[in-house]
Amino acid sequence: MTMMAAAGLTVLAAGVAQAEVVDAQPNGFEVRREVVANAPAATVWNVLVRPSKWWASSHTWSGSAANLSLAPASGGCFCERLPNGGSVLHMTTVNATPGQKLVLSGGLGPLQTSGATGALAFVLAEKDGKTTVTVTYDVGGYVKGGLDKWAGPVDGMIGQQVAGLKAAVEGK
């Protein structure tokens, strides 16, 4: 076993995060991440709906997560202000159940300029003062060369955001 593989197993064994490309086909894919936050679901929710607190600036069009906002109500916007007065609608809120579930619809990043769209779901389950956050992103549609090639990179990006959410919730 390589050193990198051993390190990866150590991280998974520690319960930090579980990652999975659930399915990858030319016409779509599903990625799933799960993490346990040391906080009640209400606390996780309050951070979740403020992406400027946890989304990685490297995955914004403006270069700063401070420009992100999220309206946690059906029809709401996961949006970004651009420095020149422009804006980006990343996704639309389709289900907001405080402390339990947030579902957004749309294509993130370069998927916006393709024929693909997806459902990004955050499901919160609290037990003993800790909250398991399960994040799935199901993407389907057309991308030249096939969406299956996007599954791994998108999984990595989602993993970065989930780690940022956990860190922000736990004050790290």
Image (spheres, rainbow, N blue to C red):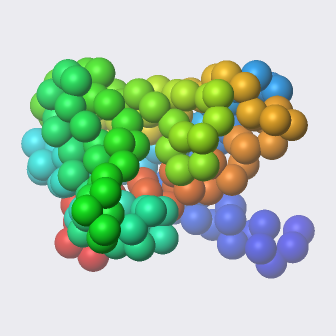
Q: Compare residues 22 and 138 and report the one nearer the observer.
A: 138
Q: Is residue 24 above or below residue 83?
A: above
Q: Position of residue 63 (x, y in %)?
A: 41, 73
Query: Residue at 24% of width from left, 68% of height from top?
Result: 66
Q: Position of residue 132 (x, y in %)?
A: 34, 41
Query: Residue at 39% of width from left, 68% of height from top?
Result: 62
In the picture, the quarter occupied by the N terminus is bottom right
Is residue 131 visible in the rendered structure shown here? no
Q: Compare residues 96 and 118 and report the one nearer the observer.
A: 118
Query: Residue at 36% of width from left, 49% of height from top?
Result: 88
Drawn side of residue 105 relative to residue 142, left or right: left
Is residue 86 visible in the rendered structure shown here? yes
Query: Residue at 77% of width from left, 74% of height from top?
Result: 4
Q: Compare residues 15 and 28 and report the one nearer the observer.
A: 28
Q: Is residue 136 above or below residue 52?
A: above
Drawn side of residue 150 relative to residue 89, left or right: right
Q: Position of residue 69 (x, y in %)?
A: 21, 52
**Quarter occupied by residue 50:** bottom left
In the picture, the quarter occupied by the C terminus is bottom left
